[in-house]
Image: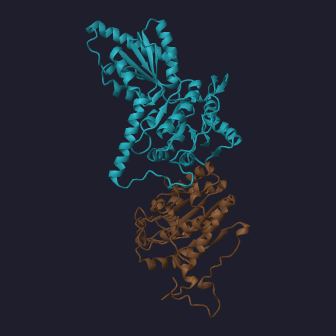
Amino acid sequence: MAIELLKGNVAFAEAAVRAGCEAYFGYPITPQTEALEHMAKRMPELGRAFVQAESELAAINMVLGAAAAGARAMTSSSSPGTSLMMEALSYMAGSELPAVLVDVMRGGPGLGNIAPAQSDYLQMVKGGGHGDYRMIVLAPATVQELIDLTTLAFDLADRYRVVTVVLADGSLGQMMEGAELPPMRPLAERPAWSLTGARGREPNLISSIHLDPEEMEAFNQHLQAKYAEIAEREVRVEHHLLDDARIAVVAFGTAGRIAKTAIAAARADGLAVGLLRPVTLWPFPEADLRALAERVDALLVFEMNAGQMVEDVRRVVEGRVPVHFYGRAGGVMPMPEEVVDALRGIEDARRERAGHDRGADRGAPDLAEEVTA
Amino acid sequence: MTVMVPETLLTPVYAYPESLTHVPTHYCPGCTHGIAHRLIAEVIDELGVRQDTIGVASVGCSVFSYRYFATDFAQAPHGRAPAVATGIKRVHPDRLVFTYQGDGDLASIGIAEILHAAVRGDPITVFFVNNAIYGMTGGQMAPTTLPGQKTSSSPLGRDAATTGAPLRMSELLAQLDGAAYVVRRSLHDVVHIRRAKKAIRQAFEVQQQGLGFAMVELLSSCPTNWGMTPEAALGFIRDEMVPAFPLGDFKVPGDFKSPDDVKSPDDVKSPDAPTAKGQA
């Protein structure tokens, strides 16, 4: 394979085709529609299933059906569209169906706009639909990573029978950059549990209903055990210039990429800063973050939203170190300089306080609000 | 001493369908869901397609319909069975895929999904059980509830001025080019049950031949939530529902245009014919 100039939306769609996606169902919504358009052309020419559904609601239920039928199935959408999918995603968790959802996030709430944002962290990471369930959530920062994580998403979905979300944003979907597509993989076998017609075996059932509370609880325990295994085995995280860092930025996806530019500038300015970039948002890199909190003076959570992942960072850090937040919401693309300014503000306050009492007071919580945009 | 048994007595004329499972029913006494299940299972047996059939259950009383069929089954979110069926059928074009949906599921919350499955002409078979009420939740008004019909959410009777008139899904769907087979039958007496079975068979055959979307609407009883005896409930179908939801073939492919071969007592004009009295 070779490096090609690829648009994010086309890149992940083609990556899905090559990962053996047999069925794609979608509905047009900016800024992800090029993925639907790519699939409209590619899937039929490969003899695979493509339907432009009447709504995102229908699209995700077609995914549910195709997944139940044993195919690698996916949909892609953007924030208002993924809101419509939450019902079926809960059913799929309750039926242990594997599938891939790519969410090319945009500014919200409501219809919001079509500009890049990271507004769906809580929706995807915390469930979104009803009931106790989890989805694996992968956060790419480049078009290459969007390709690689889409491929991985199918494997993880199948391995654990869970829905895996690739949480991209409008800038990643619309951006063109050099990236390499993987070779075409053969189609996967139909899993033994799938609906293929009960030939020479007992009938299979795909259902999420357990009327008996004890039975429902036992199923919940089974799910939780599976989620614990995923949390144990599937954490992925990038450490960037953290060895000597006194302040660490925590940022995912496009924000993580912006943070890298900011960190280079801040380091040139003499600030000892680095980046922890969660690649899996669920499972969250808790151990890495906890260890980091033991050895830096402050954390800056940087997001393209009003502060969503920061709740998880604070939960994990448990007050070990001040957790500051800087974010731009509503589809505004933050500039690296804004992050540098936030880092400089933290560093100045840190030095000032160290001058007063030699750093004894590490937990001042009010500072976090001062730097919040 | 040897007793000679005539050959005709050794030939089984009745057997429990292989496609019907041996589990106690959860449906109320007198409910016609059981009849509909039985007919579908008999047809699956007769077509020899049990191992090629995948069903999709809906939400409502029929949420547990999967219990009764010895075929692969999926249980869909409320109203979304047609979309789930589309997903399955696109993966397995060579399997027979059917949905089994009530009127709250199909005509209310799932109207977009059923409409667009028909628009696309998805070759799936839909069994639409219309009993003019929400059964599972305890008897609330449905889009199919008759004007003046009392339900727990229309305690004074359905007021058409504010809640609309009964939604006739078969007439609606038959307008669509993608719909190949749309008929309405009733389960209120033996003659109509036999006609329903013929339609169920045809609806599967339409799918086998790849002709497009097929739906059989089945007028059904809900004695519990109508507050009637099972017998009175069958009378309610005949006297109240059939006039509001006329039976008939709304769309049938040319090759299938054979009239029902089962005569109703009402159709029989001969003075020698048995009287309709006593026939529900």
| Residue B254 vertical position relative to residue B110 in the rendered view, above or below | below
Residue B4: image location, x then y, percent: 53, 87
**Foreground residue, A36 or A147?**
A147
Which chain is the one coloured brown? B
- How many marks on residues? 0
Q: Residue at x 48, y 61 (%)?
A: B65
Can residue B95 be seen at all in this image of the molecule? yes
- Quick one: which residue is furthest to the right in this view? B254
**Foreground residue, A1 or A332?**
A1
Which chain is the one coloured cyan? A
Can residue A327 be seen at all in this image of the molecule? no
Scheme by which the image is coloured: by chain
Q: Residue at x 39, y 42 (%)?
A: A223
Residue A237: image location, x then y, percent: 46, 23
Displayed quadrant of residue B165: bottom right
| Residue B263 vertical position relative to residue B206 in the rendered view, above or below | below
- Quick one: which residue is furthest to the front in this view? B1
Decide if residue B212 is on the left or right side of residue B4: right
Residue B261: image location, x then y, percent: 65, 78
- Quick one: which residue is furthest to the bottom in this view? B271
Residue A12: image location, x then y, percent: 60, 32
Q: Quadrant of the N terminus of chain A?
A: top right
Displayed quadrant of residue B12: bottom right
Decide if residue A44 is on the left or right side of residue B125: right
Q: Quadrant of the C terminus of chain A?
A: top left
| Residue A84 vertical position relative to residue A246 in the rendered view, above or below | below
**Foreground residue, B158 or A75?**
A75
